[in-house]
Amino acid sequence: MNDVLTLKGQFEHRKKEGGMGAPKLPKGGSVSADRVISLINNLTAMQAFWTKNSLLQKCLISAYYIKVAAKSNRIQGFFSNSKEKVNDAIVGAKFSAQPAHIITYFVSLQSIQQSIAVARQVVDVLNSKFEGDVEAAVFNDPQAYENIDFTKYGTVKTTFQKYVVDAYYVERFGVEPGRLDETQNAIVTLYDTGNPIIPLLKKLGVTVYSYDMLDDTTVRLDAGAVTVLMEKAPYLVAMGTTDMSKIPPSAFHDQAAPIMGQIPDPGAQPTIGVIDTLFDERVYFHKWVKYTKMVNDNIPIDPIDYRHGTEVSLIIVDGPALNPSLDDGCGRFKVRHFGVATHRQFSSFEIIRDIKQIVASNPDIHVWNLSLGSETEVNRNFISAEGAILDQIQYQNNVIFVIAGTNNTNGELHKHIGAPADSINSMVVNSVDRNQQPASYSREGIVLSFFTKPDISYYGGVRGDLLRVVEPLGAADVGGISFAAPWISRKLAYLIEVMGLSREVAKALLVDSAIGWEQETSHQRLALRGNGVVPVNIQNILHTAEDEIKFVLEGSAEQWDTYNYKLTVPVVANKQPFVAKATLCYFPRCSRNQGVDYTNTELDLYFGRINDKGKISSINENIQSTDTPHGLMEADAREQFRKWDNVKHISEVLKAHPRAKKAYSNALWAISLKTKERLSNHDGEHIRFGIVVTLKEINGVNRLEDFIQQASLKGWLVNRIDVDDRVEIYNQAEADVHLE
């Protein structure tokens, strides 16, 4: 087995050159004057509606697009003015059934009036100069405008072009009503209109207090308040979910004999945070767990309330001792356990507030296990409030949450995962059997139409092969996704705390190990297993086959292009006998109020040989951000190249009889990350990333030493991830120092 390597070197950065160019229609597209007139009529109706409804200083107007729209295809003409960019007026986004974008803008009445006036000028130009209809071939030809005096119509060429392109992509304008179940308490997010929520709701006759606020736009409402809101101002509601959650019970639970386990006292082992139900301090491993009860003393407690949390902490502390076949080689871990819920229904709102407080008060913990989940399925158009808070916490802090994908205990077909398993930054885990087939109780992703959730799968116990755990009354045999997640928490904590790797690299290593060389292509299996099943033993993650070279890179994206063109790949007889793959992970800032357009930053990955034109020939043929013309649709870019996803895996196909690659005149390879922003907040600046690269020698030859030598000559600082050395370093760092 070869050690995994770390490569440390200098990533360069450069700004993007040039602008977007003139607006263009797609090939074969056309826009008629009647289409623009239809949009004018929509806006005229909106003007009348919002003149009557004066609750807000501006107007909420939704644009119904004809497809999943790239940022470059969004409105550029309508609602634009010299004071602000129209993209900054976006306050929400969802998908229609097609799917196609429905994007909501918050704009002034004056902006609507101006848009109507300009659109009428555009109609005049279309009727006078293009016979009422313009096709792409004519519209995109600069010569088509040489004899047009746009000042005669009161407009300019660029404005005309923007409005025509907008009219192609936008089918209509309207007011998108919110949808809430009026019979239940709810966590409701209103559109960000700049109006403080408490006085805004008071105008509608709804009284809320500061302790009901989760953030500036999200509030907890009882069923009566929800009814009033939906009767008087449903257009304010961006999204909402029920406030009551219940932990899905274990899929299998068999009582076993009492157990009196033995365990040494804890020492310098790493600590994992557990947020779960209560913990029973009478169990044999109690010294390894520092327990804090956070459930209100007025809530009645039953013996069953100690079961789930105690079982989860047992796996983290001493799971391999009771389940030798799953011995991961990571040793034991200490636990800081926070009991935030009972087995009954609980308030998601209260749990969210507890989690924020817990993480803020324990900055030394980097891995948090959260095996709580909702029976309710996640929404296809927005991230749950719980998931969004976890994503925010992970963006702001150097932590990672491991979340159970929630059990399907009632046998529903194709039941989707529940909150907070829709958290994009978290590591979401589902369960499989020993044949790596999805457990019968697994619930399905995908999230927001294309995010891969769960991320990975592991062994959570199935009928006939249950896991042994400890609970208040002794040992038990259990099965459920709650018991797959803590095994992954152990592995992440080992990689981060003991091996000293960043959370970005640790997450990338686990995802990469689950994928192997056979990336999942079945949509159904991807929805159930995620990227694949993580190996049991940590050695199989920190080592690779003798015919493979695996190395990790990390850095931060500072400008549009973050790159290095000095990656060495051994050359043999003027060829490079390797197939390659790479996995990228990063933790972006997310905006829940942007709906389906949730992640603010995209890191577009390019990795491969440097061709004779000095360009990267990416192993997945990615050309999104290159100067090569392409007709790639936004939906296709998300599907093929994981656009806007914070976990990307690209790989060449490992064929039965692979061929060596031609070595170009420059035999080096390159890696490049193109940073793209949805909003104007520069959220991608300084964002950290981790990349795992694997090169497989097609003839089975071990070329690790050649790679190390050549990489060192090119200025890379190459280190082996030597497990024994790093464990020794960790132990010495954690040892108590006694001064005489």
Image (spheres, rainbow, N blue to C red):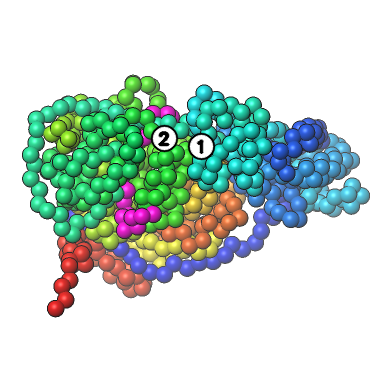
The kind of residue tagged 2 is Ser
Residue furthest front in the image: 298
Magenta stretch prevailing secondary structure: loop
Instruction: Give the alpha-carbon distance from disc 1 to disc 2, as whole Å.
Output: 10 Å
Q: From which residue to which does the magenta span run? A: 360-377
The secondary element bearing badge 1 is classed as strand
Looking at the image, residue 139 lies above or below residue 501: above
Res 473 quadrant in image: top left
Looking at the image, residue 113 lies above or below residue 604: above
The secondary element bearing badge 2 is classed as strand
Kindly identify which residue carries mark 2.
347
Q: Is there CB contact under 8 Å for labels 1 and 2?
A: yes
Closer-to-camera residue (305/194): 305
Kindly identify which residue carries mark 1.
220
Residue furthest right in the image: 152
Quadrant that contains the C terminus = bottom left
Closer-to-camera residue (122/227): 227
Q: Is residue 546 highlighted in magenta?
A: no
Which label belongs to residue 417? none
